[in-house]
Structure formats: C-alpha cells, structure tokens
Image (cartoon, helix red, strand yellow):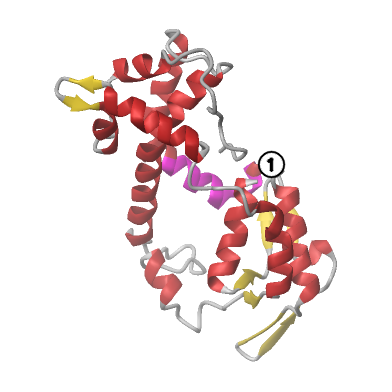
Amino acid sequence: MGVLKQYLAACDAYGIRPWYLQADRGRETPLIAAAHWNFALAAEGRVEWNGRVFQQGKLLRDSYKATPSTKNIKIESWWERMLHVSSRQWVDYFGELARDGDFDGDMLEDQIAMYAVFEDVLRQELFDFVEAWNVHRIRLQKNRPHVVHGQPWMNYHYPDPEKACNWGIPIDRSVLSEVARPLADIDINSSLEPETKRWCSAALTEITVGSISLASLCANTSNPPRSSLARTANMPRWTPGLSIATFSP
C-alpha cells in the first residue's frame, strides 16, 4: 500500500494528477491504476498547448498503461544510477550479513532489528541522492534535439513553454478522499509500529560502541559497525507489543 499512498499524497499536495501513467507490472500498480482511472473518470482531461487541444478519453488505456519494467528505459536507467551511487554498498552489506548468519529474513526479531538500525540512515541516503539528481545538469544532445537540457529542478519549476507542456489535470477532491480513506492508518514514513519504534530506540540507546550509544551512532553515520546489528538482533524471541507495521517497503 505504500506506493499507492505516496501517489495519492503527491496528488493531494499538488492538486493535480498526471495526464498519463506508465507503470511496470508490480503488485501495487493495479491499485494505482484504479485510483488514477477514478480521477480520470471524475474530471475531464483537457489540455491546450501551442494552439492544439488534447482531449482524454474515458477508457483505462487512455490514461494508463502497464508494461514490463524493461520497457521503462528512463526509469530503469534512473534506478541503475541510484543503485550504483547510493544503494549497491547496502545490497552487498546486507547480503554479507545474511550469508554470515547475522541476519535471518524469516525471523521477525531480525527484521525489526534491521529496520530499527538502518531505516533512517537509508532514507537519508536516498533523499540525498534525489537532491543531487535534481540539480545535476542534463547536457544538450545534438543527436537528440527532443531532450530538454538543463537542471531537472529548474526545468520542472521554470519550464520553457515552447518545449514543455503542463500535463497536470486537476483532481476531484471527493474522489481523493474516498480512495485515501482505507489508507489512513498506514504510515509510509516508518516500517515499524510507533510502540515498536519507541522500544527499539530505547534498546539502541542502551547499546554502546565505545562511549557512544548505538542510537546516536546510527543517526550520524552511513556505515554502522557490523557488530551493532548482530548485538541488536539478539533481542528476546518474543517481546510483547513488538510488530512490523502493515506497510512493508
């Protein structure tokens, strides 16, 4: 449900939905397709640009298309860059933990420990990558004149009206409220229930590396010591009230 809630949160924040969505065939994409189609049915899709009028139909295929992820070349390229710059070290590190027996993905305790120790660090690293990407410069490409050059954030906020069209369509707020209501209790900012997160924070505060608590160390470094996870994972086999939130990334 996390991807759907993020999509609805973006529509809520900007007051618009995109003219057209192309997504892969993931588990959550049918939910996004349904929400997007409901927006399209509730409000007319009409855009005027450079003397032309674009009118959107009411069929699902007029506003949404599901394709294999390999067909989304630009998205796949972006994910590859993020993996190379920001995520690869973590994929390798977590794989090493599993191979060495320091993490068991089938154990709830190990899952909770992983989220408690690394979630905030990973979120910050991904946020930093997005920030860096949005200010990088897209080169002018002579053999691809249709590609808009410049910085992504500048192109988004100050587009050239001769080269870019605003394809945002105002949403019907009543439809948004109806679709978002079942997701009200889902927190996309944390993978742990609040009670569990508080318990873990208290436990991490008691664990020290030298004279520094593990909670402080994890909040200020992108490379927590290997022994930290192993020690954190040694929580009791069952602790009252501990659970992972219904949202799982």
Considering the whole magenta stretch, tell me its main secondary structure: helix
At 73% from the left and 78% from the top, the residue drawn is 45
At 42% from the left and 75% from the top, the residue drawn is 157
Q: Determine if the magenta segment contains residue 52.
A: no
At 71% from the left and 40% from the top, the residue drawn is 27
From the top left corner, tell me how far across and down residue 226 is, in percent: 31, 18
At 42% from the left and 42% from the top, the residue drawn is 82
- In this view of the protein, can residue 56 be seen by the observer? no
Q: Mark 1 belongs to which amino acid?
A: Gly
Q: Can you say which quadrant of the picture contains the C terminus? A: top right
Tell me the quarter of the picture where residue 52 sits: bottom right
Q: Determine if the magenta segment contains residue 79.
A: yes
Residue nearer the viewer, 240 or 33: 240
Mark 1, residue position: 26
What's drawn in magenta, residue-wise? 70-82
Whether 115 is drawn above or below 32: the answer is: above
